[in-house]
Amino acid sequence: MIKVWGRLNWVNVKKALWCLEELGLKYERTDAGMQYGVVNTPEYRKMNPMGLVPTLEEDGFVMWESHTIVRYLADKYGKGVLRPMELEPRTIGNQWMDWSFSFQASVRDAFWNLIRTPADKRDMKAVEASRIKSGQMAAILDAALADRMYVAGPFTMGEIPIGCEVQRWIRLPFERPNLPHLEAWFERLCARPAFKKNVDIP
């Protein structure tokens, strides 16, 4: 049985859960992180010395880092599905998985100020700078989607990290640029049951 530690409302946990659901895998999840604690216990730190979520364990094999978890699951259970057999789409999927950390960094200040910070303590200059930068970054993804349905052509593991990051950006209460290819792609993600269940939630 696959076991996952992490809270439902954290973007990196959503990546692991979306991947599990896309592959139809059974798993047990334990709330961990923020208000749930757990991550600073000696038992948890033995599994994940970073004290972050998610952590995944399967038959005694433990791993952490959300993108590593997605790659592991795709390699083991999703060959020819989430993990393309052809080198080029597999490489492009990996490229966008790694790029999603750059996009995440551009959104971070807006997310923390607008969602995690009381209104009277928000740094609105940082929010505006983040809004502009993240819009510029999103335009890169929009251009890449101009001639394809998904980032690597077919739906792959590459969609999962960036889809989770874009969901968070799209749901932030600020103005975004008009990006028709990205918006159409996001609508396709929203139509996927595993995405609706695990990612596009409050």
Image: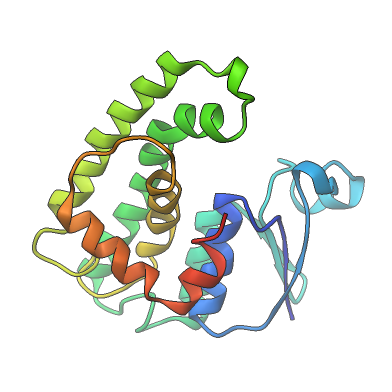
Q: Position of residue 173 (x, y in %)?
A: 42, 38
**Residue found 13% across the figure and 50% down from its top:** 143
Q: Position of residue 107 (x, y in %)?
A: 41, 35
Residue placed most toward the observer, 19 or 88: 19
- State whether residue 117 appears in this view: yes
Decide if residue 69 is in sight here. Answer: no
Q: Check the image and report above or below for 183 versus 172.
A: below
Residue 86 % position (x, y): 24, 76
The x, y position of residue 12, in whole percent, is: 56, 52
Q: Quadrant of residue 148?
A: bottom left
Q: Residue at x 48, y 65 (%)?
A: 71
Q: Which residue lies most toward the right here?
A: 42
73 or 87: nearer the viewer: 73
Image quarter in which the C terminus is found: bottom right
Q: Quadrant of the N terminus?
A: bottom right
Could you say which is closer to the camera, residue 129 or residue 84? 129
Question: Would residue 183 appear left or right of 174 to someone viewing this image?
Answer: left
Image quadrant assignment for residue 58: bottom right
- In the image, residue 85 sits, relative to residue 162, either above or below, namely below
Which residue occupies 74% across, 49% down?
Answer: 48
Give the color scheme: rainbow, by chain, secondary structure or one colour: rainbow
Q: Is residue 110 left or right of residue 115?
A: left
Which residue is found at the position 38% from the left and 50% from the top? Answer: 166
How many numbered markers are drawn?
A: 0
Above/below status of 39 relative to 93: above
Looking at this rendering, what residue extends furthest in the left direction? 147
